[in-house]
Image: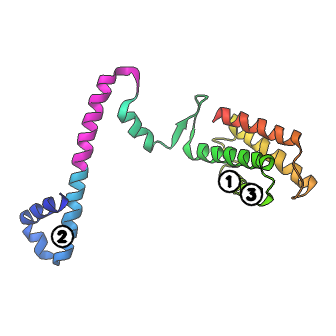
Amino acid sequence: MLLVVADAEASNCGQQAAAYPAGRARLLLTRRATALYLLAGAAATAGRARAAEEVEGAGGEGVVGAIKSLFDPNEETKAGKVLPKAYLKAAREVVRTLRESLEEKDAAGDSAKFRRGADSAKVSIREFLGGWRGQQSVAKEESYVALEKAIRSLAEFYSKAGPFASLPGDVKNKILDDLNAAEAYL
């Protein structure tokens, strides 16, 4: 379909096509035709979205709200707070990987499988702390405080007992409680 639009446009713009080599003129025309095609599609979609939103009334945000949320850098949490999407993604990843590594320790007798899970948790913790430690936008959030508390508990245990020590049940339960608290605020 785009080639037909580009060929029709080429007949209208003979001067521009003559100024450039044949391949380049077709590329310029194809880009222009693609842009026109996308704009026409976006306009039609926006019109349908507005119509759908009017039908829905004030009950929800509709399609336009969904499209706006794709480009919004913030997201509303379960608690109703608006936080950066990148923070929420990183925090959820830490909760998921740390919880999985703690649960694998019990279920798996295979230490290699546990180490793989622990390595993924370690990477997600480093990324989280590297990106969000000291950020004023999230430093006082309950989820950040709970995650930092869980990570600190884990670090304190391994710094005292050594890197190959087995995690006792009370420390593990404390960390899981902190992870559950953090997840409740995310």
Secondary structure of the residue carrying numbered label 1: helix
Dot 3 and dot 1 residues touching (CB under 8 Å): no
Q: Is residue 39 left or right of residue 125?
A: left
Start and end of the magenta stretch? 39-60
Q: Is residue 33 left or right of residue 158?
A: left
How many marks do you count on the picture?
A: 3
Q: Earlier in the sequence, mark 2 or mark 1?
A: 2
* Number of the front mark, 3 or 2: 3
The C terminus - image quarter:
top right
Give the x, y percent position of residue 164: 88, 58
Give the x, y percent position of residue 163: 87, 58
Q: Earlier in the sequence, mark 3 or mark 2?
A: 2
Q: What kind of residue is marked 2? A: Arg
Q: Residue at x 53, y 38 (%)?
A: 75
Q: Residue at x 88, y 39 (%)?
A: 170
Which of 173/38 is in front?
173
Q: What kind of residue is marked 1? A: Ser
Q: Measured along the vertical axis of the image, is residue 109 above or below residue 20? A: above
Q: Residue at x 8, y 70 (%)?
A: 15
Category of crowding for the residue at label 1, using alpha-carbon neighbours closer than 10 angstroms: few (below 14), some (14–19), many (at least 20): many
Outermost residue on the right side: it is 160
Name the residue carrying label 2. Answer: 26
Secondary structure of the residue carrying numbered label 3: helix
Q: Quadrant of residue 56?
A: top left
Dot label at residue 113: 3
Give the x, y percent position of residue 138: 65, 41
Name the residue carrying label 1. Answer: 124
* Number of the front mark, 3 or 1: 3
Alpha carbons under labels 2 and 1: distance apart: 47 Å
Alpha carbons under labels 3 and 2: distance apart: 55 Å
Give the x, y percent position of residue 182: 70, 37
